[in-house]
Image: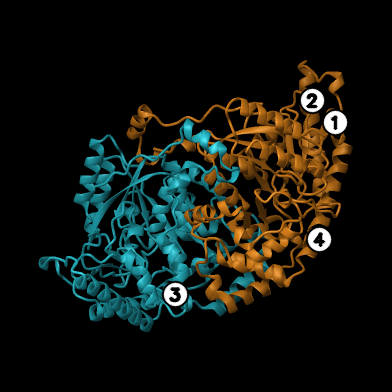
Chain colours: A orange, B cyan
């Protein structure tokens, strides 16, 4: 376990130096942790049409009934425009908050609409929860790898991230306990565990139901909060949804989103929080944006009311399953020996481990030249791990494009391995040469 | 000038104490500065229909052509829904950023669309600019009084606010210089001056053009950045727009908004920043919300493209002028001797100073009982000033309601003065008994 050093704080010398800088360059210390994500730098090159992008997490909106939505939204403007185009409350539209409780009930959550705070995507909820809890230097626990946007928010508030490894059944309770014990031994109580239990981004694994209660118990025992981020929970391929951590423990802070089950461009997410947190979260939200857009909230509310949204989620899910199948088949067919990958049962992502000695980040420019893009693994760790790993998304490209993309990727990996062999670089030891979807650990560096 | 003490920072003792608290109550130190604004607490009571609310800053959307907008927005969904409902870039829709440059040209600004960052209302831009620049304890200069949402963001990042007084021509350069000199004498270089030059919220005054260059020179001399917040600039009643500070100095950070010129419920604002700030601001925005809603941005873009938005602004402005006139006439007719107020030449607000001894905050419950609401003055100061002052908004109620509201308010003030006289509380000294719109200073405590 790596515990990063406490963040640098301003001192007198630095302040004097800063005063000599141009006024627009006297940045706060926290900006030192703000770096462009590798994924972001990649989007520009990967967005050329000839490149098969397996990098982004854009949902496939082709399945949306745009004509119906067009009529509905037009009607909303005509009938309720005076409200929809006006400022609203910082906590969000009351009718929508009630409907959000219905959505969460699918995963066993019983909640009061008064404890729901609507945000501009769940990213905003994550950012504000970090704002509420994290002083500079505070420790946050997160799966390794973890969502890149969460790592960005933690860095923005100068929190230190300690990763806990997963296996094919998600976060490993024994490793969580070890981390908690080690930290406690150093007098550190992490502010919270940030976890994506279902169809993990980027790891593609799901936290076994049998582990969920144990993880909650451990956090309670060590006085650590739990932030459950669940944008993909309803997108399971086997037709089952898993009980949310929040359904087992009302102190869990739960983050949800309509970005993957309806439309990401509306940016409607939410947090369900204990009453002790709620008022502060509303105040923080008010400081961040005054209020979320009334219009997009009312669109989601009307959509939930007038459409069979569960059927729409099923349509999305069937498409994603077909694409997942295409990706797994292509990986099995094309990837060379020494590559392993996870097998997601929902969501958007497969996490691939490359043969020893192959660096996913260094390989990326050559992959883009070969017209395929992915997200390299180091971006999903706060501590430099993940160099042999990469995330592949199957959510947006068609099955045919996915197959072609994986074929191109396999050729790039083969070429990397060839270079290593030619120059006599150490190959992976024989015992570690394994292949395929049966190797679970997504956190092997 | 008051310089608040540096914010409280966590120390070992406090951390130990915090570790004993429930996990969901171990808040960051910065939350100590988060308090519900007086205005917010007021919205709940003041929203009853029998109450004439002169408290809120909601634009009057009745002037919008909802039927046309309904058709346009429906068409946007049908034709471009795949893009409008999808994730976009963190910096904002490129076409809109170009149009925003056209809008800013109205105030003499020449800008590159690459330096524009679209945000969820200009509140988000303000919050993120504070995030980029302010370490805990940093000093920010702001007019006294200042926008309550700005004070909230400054508090959220533990910045200290030093107010500089205005007169009827806005921020007083001599007082700004005095503040800068005093702070420099204590080794403090404020991070920036936050200013609302046009139709100030809440003071209702406008910074004289003759003062603008001097203020920029002073800030440059002392190495202090300038953040120009300009949501009301196009809503001037005399038909002139003022040259933006940014038009005179490219290092100024400029914040703009469509909330007052089009529709607040879309939450589309922006920041125009120097290139050195831009990349960091985009990163901060990404951490805050990933990206602003594509849909609302595309609605604004289409609106600017297809409608005569300048004519619409003129329509809005004529309505606001009529309401301003109604309010000023009612104040002149009904308010008792000893009350003074500012005369806005645009925007939404009149700033009223009550007779000595009358406390606006203490009077508020009695005003609401008398079915009129306002925003009491202390909420617009970070340092407890403003107890004799209040903000009246004329943007939302009809002229008839405004007149009735001011009549009720005048009766409440009279009753307060009666109580003071009855109980022999000290009256204002004779020399200070003045009345009407000719007394400029909005900052008299």
Q: Secondary structure at mark 1?
A: loop
Q: Is residue B111 visible?
A: no
Q: Check contact, mark 1 vs mark 2: CB within 8 A.
A: yes
Q: What chain letter is assigned to the residue under label 2?
A: A
Discs 4 and 2 lie in a common subunit: yes
Q: Return the residue at label 3.
A: B60
Q: Secondary structure at mark 2?
A: helix
Q: CA distance from mark 3 to mark 2?
A: 66 Å
Discs 4 and 3 lie in a common subunit: no
Q: State the image coordinates of residue A267 (x, y, percent, origin top left).
A: 61, 57
**Residue visible at 15% across and 70% down?**
B434
Mark 4 residue crowding within 10 angstroms, few (<14) / some (14–19) / many (20+): some
Discs 4 and 1 lie in a common subunit: yes
Q: Who comes first in sequence, dot 1 or dot 2?
A: 1
Q: Who comes first in sequence, dot 4 or dot 1?
A: 4
Answer left or right for B376 relative to B80: left
Q: State the image coordinates of residue B11 (x, y, percent, origin top left).
A: 46, 32
Most foreground residue, B75 or A102: A102
Q: Return the residue at label 1.
A: A336
- Res B244 quadrant in image: bottom left
Most foreground residue, A403 or A69: A69
Mark 1 residue crowding within 10 angstroms, few (<14) / some (14–19) / many (20+): some
Q: Secondary structure at mark 4?
A: helix
- Res A187 quadrant in image: top right
Q: Work out whether A407 lies above or below A363.
A: below
Q: Return the residue at label 4.
A: A315
Foreground mark, 3 or 2, reads 3
Q: CA distance from mark 4 to mark 1?
A: 33 Å
Q: Return the residue at label 2.
A: A417
Foreground mark, 4 or 2, reads 4
């Amino acid at each position: 376990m790596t515990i990063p050093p406490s963040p640098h704080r301003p001192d007198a010398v630095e302040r004097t130096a800063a005063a000599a800088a141009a006024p627009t360059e006297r940045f706060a210390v926290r900006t030192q942790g703000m770096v462009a994500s590798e994924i972001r730098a990649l989007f520009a090159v990967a967005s050329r049409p000839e490149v098969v992008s397996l990098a982004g997490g854009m949902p496939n909106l082709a399945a949306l009934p745009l004509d119906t939505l067009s009529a509905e939204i037009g009607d909303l403007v005509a009938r309720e425009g005076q409200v929809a185009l006006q400022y609203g409350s910082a906590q969000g539209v009351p009718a929508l908050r009630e409907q959000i409780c219905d959505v969460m009930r699918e995963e066993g959550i019983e909640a009061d609409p008064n404890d729901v705070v609507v945000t501009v995507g769940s990213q905003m909820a994550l950012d504000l929860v970090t704002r509420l809890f994290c002083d500079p230097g505070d420790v946050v626990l997160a799966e390794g790898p973890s969502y890149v946007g969460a790592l960005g928010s933690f860095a923005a508030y100068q929190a230190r991230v300690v990763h806990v490894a997963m296996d094919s059944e998600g976060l490993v309770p024994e490793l969580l306990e070890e981390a908690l014990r080690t930290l406690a031994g150093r007098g550190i109580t992490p502010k919270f565990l940030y976890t994506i239990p279902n169809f993990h981004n980027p790891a593609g694994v799901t936290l076994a139901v049998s582990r969920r209660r144990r993880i909650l118990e451990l956090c309670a025992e060590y006085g650590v909060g739990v932030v459950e981020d669940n944008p993909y929970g309803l997108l399971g391929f086997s037709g089952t949804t898993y009980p949310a951590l929040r359904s087992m423990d009302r102190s869990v802070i739960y983050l949800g989103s309509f970005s993957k089950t309806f439309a990401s461009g509306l940016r409607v997410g939410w947090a369900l929080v204990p009453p002790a947190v709620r008022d502060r979260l509303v105040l923080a939200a008010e400081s961040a944006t005054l209020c979320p857009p009334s219009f997009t909230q009312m669109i989601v509310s009307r959509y939930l009311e007038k459409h069979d949204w569960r059927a729409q989620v099923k349509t999305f899910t069937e498409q994603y399953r077909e694409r997942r199948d295409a990706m797994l088949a292509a990986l099995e067919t094309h990837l060379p020996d020494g590559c392993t990958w996870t097998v997601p049962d929902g969501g958007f992502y497969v996490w691939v481990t490359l043969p020893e000695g192959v660096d996913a980040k260094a390989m990326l420019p050559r992959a883009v030249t070969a017209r395929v893009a992915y997200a390299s693994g180091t971006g999903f760790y706060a501590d430099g791990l993940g160099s042999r790993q990469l995330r592949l998304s199957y959510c947006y490209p068609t099955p045919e494009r996915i197959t072609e993309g994986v074929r191109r990727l396999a050729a790039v990996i083969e070429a990397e391995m060839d270079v290593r062999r030619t120059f006599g670089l150490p190959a992976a030891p024989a015992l570690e040469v394994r292949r395929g979807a049966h190797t679970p650990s997504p956190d092997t560096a």
